[in-house]
Amino acid sequence: MADQKSFPKAPGNVVDWSDPLLVSLLNKTDDWHLDNRGAIPPRHIHIEFGWGAATSKPAMLAWENDDAMVIETFFPIQQGERVRVEKPCETGVESQWCQVTESRAGHRTDDKANGIHVHFLHKG
């Protein structure tokens, strides 16, 4: 019967995790921190804080999709903060309300040297 058949089992690869070459390669990745930046050219933007959006500060848009964006600033932003992102566009300025879902000091060498903070925002 068709529903009693099982898929053939593919032979698995045996990995020797104690192999010195593999251990050496894996150790080189210990300091890697992937954060989706560099996929698009950075854009100068402004962010405004709170529902009144009375305070505006400069930032850089590092990555964006339909639901989220990553921005860089020279200051921390509290997780959960509501911000309005103002992006220049052909017709003037495009505004997008977002909520900060993660905020941290940058891990990259340039981030540390320049005091960059990286913020992950959820749109809406």
Image: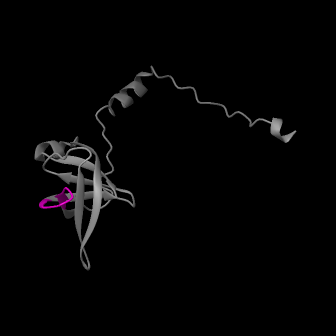
- Residue at left offset 38%, top offset 30%: 26
The quarter of the rendered structure image containing the C terminus is bottom left
Residue 108 picture location, percent across and down: 22, 43
In the rendered image, residue 50 lying in the magenta stretch gets the answer yes
Question: What quarter of the picture does the N terminus occupy?
Answer: top right
Instruction: Provide the residue span drawn in magenta.
Output: 47-57
Image-based side of 49 in relation to 2, left or right: left
Q: Residue furthest right?
A: 1
Left or right of 70: which side holds 23? right
**Left or right side of 116 for 34:** right
Q: Is residue 41 above or below residue 115?
A: below
**Figure colour scheme:** one colour
Please state the horizontal and vertical placement of residue 11, each as a whole percent of the image: 66, 31
Residue occupying the far front of the picture? 52
What is the total number of numbered labels drawn onto the structure image? 0
Residue sitting at x 27%, y 62% = 41
Up-down relation of residue 52 to residue 8 (above or below)? below
Residue 78 on image: x %, y %: 20, 44
Dividing the picture into quarters, in which one does residue 2 lie? top right
Q: Quadrant of residue 62?
A: bottom left
> Which residue appears farthest toward the bottom when viewing the image?
91
Q: In the rendered structure, does residue 40 fall within the stretch colored magenta?
A: no
Residue 45 in percent (x, y) is at 20, 63
Tell me: residue 46, above or below residue 103: below
Q: What residue appears at the point 70 percent right and 33 percent down from the top-left corner?
A: 9
Q: Residue at x 25, y 59 (%)?
A: 61
